[in-house]
Amino acid sequence: MTPRSAIVVGAGFGGLALGIRLQSAGVETTIVEARDKAGGRAYVWEKDGYTFDAGPTVITDPACLQELWALTGRDMADDVTLAPVQPFYRLNWPDGVTFDYTNDDASLNAQIAQLNPDDVAGYAKFLDYSAGVFKEGYEKLGQVAFLDFASMIKAAPALAKYQAWRSVYSIVSSYVKDEHLRQALSFHTLLVGGNPMTTSAIYALIHKLERDGGVWFAMGGTNQLIAGMVTHFERLGGKLMLNDPVVSIETLGDKATGVTTASGWVGQADMVACNGDVMHVYKDLLKTNRSGQRTKAKLERKRYSPSLFVVHFGIKGTWPGIPHHTILFGPRYKGLLADLYDTGVLPEDFSLYLHHPTVTDPSLAPEGHSSFYALAPVPHMGKFPVDWDEIAPVLETRILDEIGRRLIPDIHERITVKFSYTPKDFAQDLNAHLGSAFSLEPILTQSAWFRVHNRDDHIPNLYFVGAGTHPGAGIPGVVGSAKATAALMLEAQA
């Protein structure tokens, strides 16, 4: 049979993973990307000898990435070098408590015992729970599409067994009593856009995912993992077009026929898949399609995850005592989350994720210097419609002041380069609806079948991959969505 053809809109992790799977199966695939580089949210800047990854920077489940090369008998290590990160994260609170989050049992249990001896046994039970939801929620459901409600009903008993309607924080709190530990075991949902107080307990699977697979960093930065995926995709015969935004997905009746780009290029294909923001696809790229506009109206009523404010900075000096990943918790947890997700105010306090890649790979900065980024979750632009150009310098200073107070006292004198990335940038650069950093908020009623489907309900040859579709945000989630979507596309063209 003559190979069929596909066009993928967007060269983020999801689009590249899907392109590799399709091309590996003999489907002639073209990926069309709006920006000057592949990567989507995993963009990269090079300034004054520093390399700054836009994110994401936490790589878990490397096996899901290695599989993309193994499909054609290749080895990911030929294109990408992954280095293990230990501790996974250092967690630090304003009261002086520090906790090194690792999969070294002896170290972990000793630290837990210091906080609350009774919680050692509670943690062991939580780990059993996490293993159970990992098996049901990730291994069984994370890489298959939910196209009808029957598939959700089939999954319901397992989800009910693990009390999926409860929040991650609620489940964690039933096992451990120390508040530091409760935060340490529940903050992960923030890395995929979820509020620990409302995100389904199924997301406790992230703990098991990290413990078993480790936390990794791509040498040269996450951008080098993207570059490796591009190399592999093109090696397989795939075509990548950059710097040419798709402006329309063309349809005829109930079929997608191809795409039109800003330059006027018209590409035709048997199948079209979208790795762009789901709201952007329906609102802008399908604006002349009636079913697309109906879906847009439904999506407008959904809940979207918060945005992020990120300060990138390069400084003089090296900091071997600051690990690769640090979480600087603020004085509030529940209250801060309520501000971000519910009331939509920019609070005086914040929790920060500090990324320090040069402790693992010094080549990312000039000799004797270090690169960092500090990330603070902030409300999306729908909840907090302000002039970010005005607020950015103020928030930037407050964040750097906090890092100065807690880690690097003379930070302001050491900075050689800095710039920030705001919700407005997410909206402009990535067409992110409301500037959301993770698309739809991962609550139970917006997960699996309730999320944007991997195949459109009305246009049977239009597919979705990435954070807005099942299973959701984060590198394993997005790469898992590519596996689920590729299976549907290959089944359709068989």
Image (cartoon, rainbow, N blue to C red):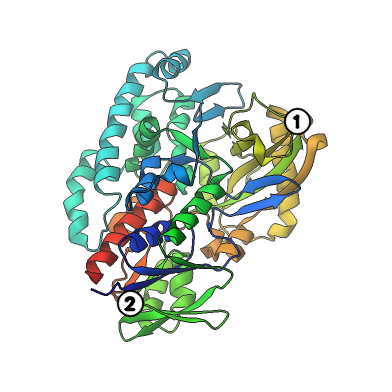
Query: Left of 15 or right of it: where is 247?
Result: right
- Vertical position of residue 191 compared to residue 43: above or below: above
- Vertical position of residue 230 compared to residue 8: above or below: above
Query: Left of 168 or right of it: where is 436?
Result: right
Label 1 CA crowd tier, 10 Å (few <14, some 14–19, many 20+):
few
Q: Can residue 470 be seen in this view?
A: no
Q: For the C terminus, which image quadrant?
A: bottom left
Mark 1 residue type: Gly
Horizontal and vertical percent position of residue 89:
52, 30
Horizontal and vertical percent position of residue 113:
43, 14
User: Which residue lies under the disc numbered 1?
Assistant: 317
- Vertical position of residue 298 compared to residue 181: above or below: below
Toward which corner of the image does residue 178 lie, by quadrant?
A: top left
- Which residue, as the protein is rendered here, is positioned at the far right? 413
Horizontal and vertical percent position of residue 255:
32, 81
Tag 1 and tag 2, C-beta contact below 8 Å: no
Identified at 60% across, 44% down, the residue is 376
Horizontal and vertical percent position of residue 209:
36, 36
Q: What element carries label 2?
A: loop
Nearer the observer: mark 1 or 2; the answer is 2
Q: For the N terminus, which image quadrant?
A: bottom left
Q: Is residue 152 visible?
A: yes
Toward which corner of the image does residue 351 lie, by quadrant?
A: top right
User: Which residue lies under the disc numbered 2?
Assistant: 270
- Vertical position of residue 266 compared to residue 361: above or below: below
Toward which corner of the image does residue 20 lie, by quadrant?
A: bottom left
Identified at 73% across, 50% down, the residue is 47
Q: Which of marks 1 and 2 is nearer the N terminus?
A: 2
Task: Find the distance from the CA under tag 1 to the CA under tag 2.
Answer: 54 Å
Mark 2 residue type: Asp
Query: Left of 307 or right of it: where is 175?
Result: left
